[in-house]
Image (tube, rainbow, N blue to C red):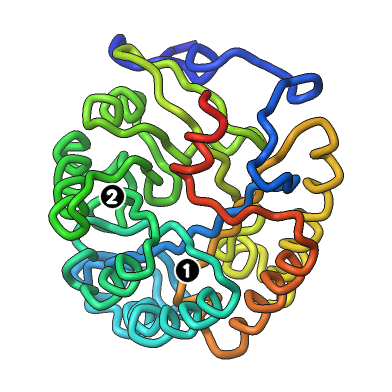
């Protein structure tokens, strides 16, 4: 079996297997049982390239150029859907993390400004919406993303979320080199863990492929209410699990999906339920990492 190149590591080399059962976890400051965070993905789709995702499956095998229907679907999310979700987050008292393409920081400057004004955390999310396995120079892509966020916010981002969670064999090494404290691509635990790299370690903060509108709505084709139902069910089970120590709940939205008029209400309803229990501490990836001190 072929392994990774010499400068990379197998996933099993990056972290040991460690069951969550019996694992020590520090209590949350307010005594809550669940550290909850929302991740809002802001992407810039290059209209000269095939679209990363499609709502309108065109009757042709070849990717059209330009692909106006699908580009506009995504653009609606940034022009309209984001602002609908922003009102919901403000009402719920939630400050999400903004996972944003480096190029999108300036292209959608008003979104960046709204997040910065509210004290949201900014996370690197690639320079454009393109798999890290497809970019010409991954280290350069990370550098450009980091610098774009730092210029706008005045602080370097601490967290990274790869577009579509894709990595190369060397991504964790390159994130450590670029000064990142944590990555969200490794969706394998309900608490933060530590990943080894060839030049130091990096934190892994729980993200989700389950309470995530891309796989749920686009791939599995569930009705919009499924997002609310799964979010509540996920929270209630984690709340039950947390008798031995707090757990992390991640909720993921893309403005062109959950920001659509017929879906947005389900984000509001999920947040209202979670808030009503008093058992959730709304946090960011950075504050979760700092609390666990992994």
Point 27% across, 67% down: residue: 44
Instruction: Give the residue drawn at x 58%, y 65%.
Output: 213
Q: Is residue 167 visible?
A: yes
Instruction: Quadrant for residue 115, please give it.
Output: bottom left
- Residue at 80% x, 63% y is 277
- Category of crowding for the residue at label 1, using alpha-carbon neighbours closer than 10 angstroms: few (below 14), some (14–19), many (at least 20): many
25 is higher (above) or lower (below) than 105: above
How far is mark 2 from mark 1, CA to CA?
15 Å
Vertical arrangement, residue 232 with respect to residue 17, above or below:
below
Q: Secondary structure at mark 1?
A: loop
Q: Which residue is the site of mark 2?
A: 126
- On the image, the x and y values in percent for residue 228 come to 72, 70
Nearest to N terminus: mark 2 or mark 1: 2
**Foreground pick, 68 / 103:** 103
Q: Are marks 2 and 1 in contact (CB under 8 Å)?
A: no
Residue 76 percent coordinates (x, y): 38, 84
In the picture, the disc for residue 254 is: 1
Q: Residues within 10 Å of mark 2 (few under 14, many from 20)?
A: many
Compared across the picture, whether 8 is left or right of 15 comes to left
Which residue appears farthest toward the bottom when viewing the image? 261
Q: Identify the secondary structure beneath mark 2.
A: loop
State whether residue 117 is above or below residue 182: below
Query: For residue 82, which quarter of the picture?
Result: bottom left
Residue 287: percent from left, percent from top: 48, 43
Q: Residue at x 57, y 80 (%)?
A: 91
| In-image side of 17 versus 167 (left or right) | right
Residue 241 horizontal/vertical position (percent): 83, 39
């Amino acid at each position: 079996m072929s392994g990774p190149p010499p400068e990379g590591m197998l996933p099993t080399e990056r972290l040991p297997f460690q069951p969550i059962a019996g694992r020590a976890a520090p209590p949350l400051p307010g005594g809550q049982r669940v550290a909850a965070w929302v991740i809002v993905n802001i992407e810039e789709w290059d209209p000269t390239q095939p679209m990363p995702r499609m709502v309108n499956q065109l009757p042709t095998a070849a990717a059209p150029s330009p692909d106006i229907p699908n580009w506009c679907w995504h653009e609606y999310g940034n022009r309209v859907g984001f602002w609908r979700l922003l009102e919901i987050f403000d009402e719920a008292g939630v400050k999400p993390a903004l996972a944003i393409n480096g190029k999108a920081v300036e292209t959608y400057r008003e979104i960046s400004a709204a997040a910065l004004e509210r004290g949201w955390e900014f996370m690197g999310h690639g320079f454009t919406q393109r798999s890290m396995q497809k970019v010409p120079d991954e280290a350069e892509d990370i550098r450009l993303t980091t610098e774009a966020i730092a210029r706008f916010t005045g602080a370097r981002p601490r967290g990274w979320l790869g577009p579509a969670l894709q990595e190369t064999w060397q991504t964790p090494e390159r994130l450590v080199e670029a000064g990142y404290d944590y990555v969200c691509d490794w969706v394998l635990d309900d608490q933060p863990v530590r990943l080894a790299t060839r030049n130091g370690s990096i934190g892994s903060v729980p993200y989700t492929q389950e309470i995530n509108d891309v796989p749920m709505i686009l791939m599995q084709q569930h009705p919009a209410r499924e997002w609310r139902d799964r979010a509540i069910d996920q929270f209630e089970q984690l709340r039950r699990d947390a008798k031995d120590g707090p757990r992390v709940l991640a909720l993921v939205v893309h403005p062109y999906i959950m920001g659509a008029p017929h879906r947005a209400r389900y984000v509001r309803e999920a947040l209202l339920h979670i808030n009503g229990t008093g058992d959730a501490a709304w946090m960011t990836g950075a504050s979760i990492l700092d609390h666990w001190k992994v």
